[in-house]
Image (cartoon, helix red, strand yellow):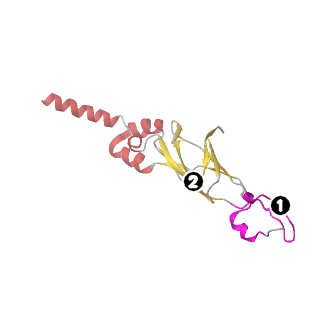
Amino acid sequence: MRSTCLLLTITLLFLVACTGCASIICGSTKTITVSSNPSGANFSIQNKEGKEIHSGVTPSTVTLKRGRGYFAAGDYTISFTKAGYKPMDMPIKQGLEAGWYVLGNFVFGGLIGWVIVDPLTGAMWTIEDINVDLKAGAGAWLPTPGEVFIVSLDQVPLDLRPKMVRIR
């Protein structure tokens, strides 16, 4: 009986020592929300090499890998397009998963979690949700007062539609 308890205790300590807290709690991927104002914008997410890994229409949810290698965050860029609005490119912000990586490994995972498991799985990184405000189309396409400019309705931003004048 005593040897069984000792073996069980040693096995549990070994399992705890071989895991990273962020890997257990957070995992190697994160689901984020991608939204825009106005909604209905097309978006495309590219990895560091410029390869498209996901595309869709806002609002949407996307699952991304937290890391791209040992101690390296995912490093993604997102591009937005919508008729009547300026195209927008921006990096997807990532940071250290301070709670589970730093504090969780201090309590549970230890040095193996800090230096090996969480950096290899990418679980040490977090990814922020994305919410962008799109800007109305480039000023070059907007007519100056007294000028007539023909565009399709879907190219006109919603906030400018009440100012439109119907021509018969």
Identity of the amino acid at label 1?
Answer: Ile
Q: Quadrant of residue 165?
A: bottom right
User: Can see residue 126?
Assistant: no
Q: Residue at x 46, y 48 (%)?
A: 97
**Along the viewing direction, whichever of 90 and 37 lies nearer the viewer:** 37
Q: Is residue 140 magenta?
A: yes
Can you identify the residue that label 1 sits on? Answer: 150
Q: Give the percent coordinates (x, y) of residue 104.
A: 37, 46
Is 121 situated left or right of 136 in this image? Answer: left
Q: Vertical placement of 158 versus 19: above or below?
A: below
Check if mark 1's residue and mark 2's residue have beta carbons within 8 Å: no
Q: What is the span of residues highlighted in magenta in the rendered image?
A: 135-164
Q: Residue at x 17, y 32 (%)?
A: 5
Q: Residue at x 69, y 54 (%)?
A: 82
Report the label total. Answer: 2
User: Can see residue 155?
Assistant: yes
Q: Is residue 156 magenta?
A: yes
Is 156 situated left or right of 115 in this image? Answer: right
Q: Give the percent coordinates (x, y) of residue 111.
A: 38, 39
Secondary structure under tag 2 reads loop
Can you identify the residue that label 2 sits on? Answer: 59
Q: CA distance from mark 1 to mark 2?
A: 30 Å
- Main structural element of the magenta stretch: helix, strand or loop? loop
Q: Residues within 10 Å of mark 1 (few under 14, many from 20)?
A: few
Q: Give the percent coordinates (x, y) of residue 145.
A: 84, 71
**Along the viewing direction, whichever of 147 and 65 lies nearer the viewer:** 147
Identity of the amino acid at label 2?
Answer: Pro
